[in-house]
Amino acid sequence: MRITCLHTADSNIAVFENTARALGLDQHQFRHVSRPDLLAAAEKAGGLTAEILQQTADVLLALSENTDRVLLTCSTLGPAATLASKSTTVPVLRVDQALAEQAMKTAGNVVALCAVETTLEPTRQLFAQVERHPQARLKTRLVAGAWEKFKQGDLAGYLQAIAVAADAEYRQGAACVVLAQASMTGAAQLTQTGKPLTSPECGLRAALI
């Protein structure tokens, strides 16, 4: 199967390649396209505007022409996958859809950690839309200062800050901690008190169904 991934951070290419290998998906062909400008525009605008939504959907549609699946890996731009899906028969998926579905099957407190402020609202909306366990309770939280570390190139500091935040949520009684952005994935290996869910693993599994 040919899977085309649209990223908004160049470093996420390695994240998805590594996850694919860990899941034993070497038989599939992955193509990666990175458009950091789309996330930068959303950050500058304070969120996902109608113009950025349409621009992202147009990119996704163009990518759908020579592939079997398109996977949007940016949580801030997630709704663009739904918009693009209306104009193509090729499945256009948002990587955090499966993440939300798996997380909300949990009975108890589900905490979705975000690093970028513009990701908070799309994450809340997505998790509210999926089928949930009657006792699932969602909280979204911004990991303060983490994204600045990422933008400064301090990936180790970025992931450590997220791991610390995840451990704190587990200690406070979270039944499930979710790393809402793909760039946060490496933090799951650094936690001490629990194993958070990550979007690349959940999303890639779902894309191949």
Image: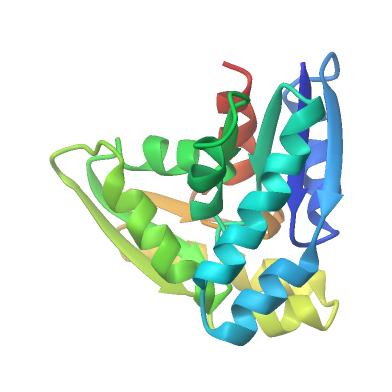
Q: Where is residue 56 shown, x and y percent of the image?
A: 65, 57
Q: Where is residue 162 shown, x and y percent of the image?
A: 59, 68
Residue at 49% from the left image edge and 53% from the top image edge: 79
Q: Is residue 75 visible?
A: yes
Relative to 99, 27 lies left or right: right
Relative to 175, 206 lies left or right: right
In depth, the one of 201 and 195 nearer the eye is 201
Q: Is residue 188 visible?
A: no
Point out the image quarter for the N terminus.
top right
Quadrant housing residue 125:
bottom left
Point out the image quarter for the C terminus.
top right
Q: Where is residue 78 shown, x and y percent of the image?
A: 53, 53
Residue at 77% from the left image edge and 39% from the top image edge: 63
Q: Hey, which residue is sitting farthest left in the picture?
A: 134
In depth, the one of 155 and 56 nearer the eye is 56
Relative to 160, 102 lies left or right: left
In depth, the one of 6 and 60 nearer the eye is 60
Residue at 31% from the left image edge and 42% from the top image edge: 104
Does 47 appear above or below 81?
below
Q: Where is residue 163 shown, x and y percent of the image?
A: 59, 64
In depth, the one of 52 and 141 nearer the eye is 52
Residue at 57% from the left image edge and 37% from the top image edge: 93
Quadrant housing residue 147:
bottom right
Does 86 appear above or below 11?
above
Color scheme of the displayed model:
rainbow
